[in-house]
Amino acid sequence: MNVRSAEAAGRAAETGVLYKRRRGKELLMDWDLYLLLVPGLLFFLLFKYVPMWGVVIAFQDYSPFKGVLHSDWVGLKHFVNLFTYDKFWAIFRNTILISFYNLIFFFPAPILLALLLNELRISWFKRSVQTIIYLPHFISWVVVAGMTYLILGTQGGIVNELIQASGGEKVAFLTTPEYFRTLIVSQSIWKEAGWGTIIFLAALSGVDTQLYEAAIVDGAGRWRQLWHITLPAIRSTILILLILRLGNILDVGFEHIFLMLNSTVNSVGDVFETYVYREGLIGGKFSYTTAVGLFKSLVGLVLVAGANWLSQKFGEEGVF
């Protein structure tokens, strides 16, 4: 090593030391902010990461009397049983179809509502509309199901009473398989679309108003402003939420489906959550249903990783 190289190496080492000292001082100065992280980290550690080790029972014939450490290992037996189950593809299809319809119809609903609210200029009216569309979020699925039965039921349902009073025949909305998925998606939109606007309204509030002023000067109308300014401004938010939603594509909501499910619509409404409920809690097949849950998680992980890669491939932001 010549003299110049030695001097350069010395300066680099000195710079590294100075950088570490500065970072250390910054950490000490902001210790109270880092302290705020502790409850959140403990929550995820205790309730999210520690329970993950219980997934090993998917590879065991778990017995509550033997415990996780002494139960017999069976390898991929439960996964084989799941994939060879004669109704597996029916359950898989039902789950995917409901998720797909939610993705097509429910996911854009909060975006459209947020865009419409953003166009309102009378502040009291805008706040009133926001409050009204937020309210269904606070209603439980039990109440939503009860309201649905009161409105669409064949015995005293408001809609069927109106149909009958108009000379028509009653329609069995709640027991006809063709209506089940439409009903589920409609309930989701009514209950959660308003609440979902919060994120998009927050993203829209960050758009620079000078962009709109410049567009108006250039003669751009409301549609052009929407297309060239508003939508590009919230594009990254939409993509991130879409990627995260793909991670739960096999989770369609147990409580919601379970409350609306009955024997006549079981062929189109039986999904993984209701299947796990029957086999795991009622049937006591803990290992088997853990394997089902692990399968769902792996599918979600693959979809999230794939969508995130595609998003970054096209120059957009990803979630990691």
Image (cartoon, rainbow, N blue to C red):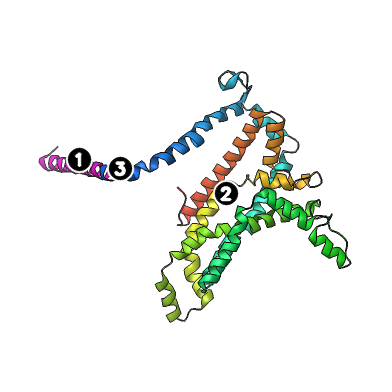
Q: Which region is colored magenta? A: 1-26
Q: Is residue 26 left or right of residue 177?
A: left
Kindly state the secondary structure of the residue where label 2 is placed.
Answer: helix
* Mark nearer the viewer, 3 or 2: 3
The three-letter amino acid code for the residue at tag 3 is Trp
Say whether residue 107 is visible: no
Q: Position of residue 201 (x, y in %)?
A: 50, 62
Residue at 70%, 46% (x, y): give it.
Answer: 257
Of residue 202 and residue 285, the one placed in the foreground of this image is 202
Q: Position of residue 163 (x, y in %)?
A: 84, 64
Total numbered labels placed on residues in the image: 3
Q: Vertically, is 124 above or below 219?
A: above
Label 1 vs label 3: CA separation? 21 Å
Residue at mark 2: 246
| For marks 3 and 2 on the same chain, the one whose residue lies earlier in the sequence | 3
Q: Quadrant of the N terminus?
A: top left
| For marks 1 and 3 on the same chain, the one whose residue lies earlier in the sequence | 1
Kindly state the secondary structure of the residue where label 1 is placed.
Answer: helix
The three-letter amino acid code for the residue at tag 1 is Val
Identify the mark at residue 80; answer none if there is no mark: none
Q: Position of residue 65 (x, y in %)?
A: 63, 19
Residue at mark 3: 31
Residue at mark 1: 17
Magenta-span inclusion, residue 124: no
Residue at 41%, 68% (x, y): give it.
Answer: 208
Could you say which quadrant of the image residue 191 lies in? bottom right
Q: Position of residue 211 (x, y in %)?
A: 42, 72
Labelled pair 2, 1 in contact (Cβ < 8 Å):
no
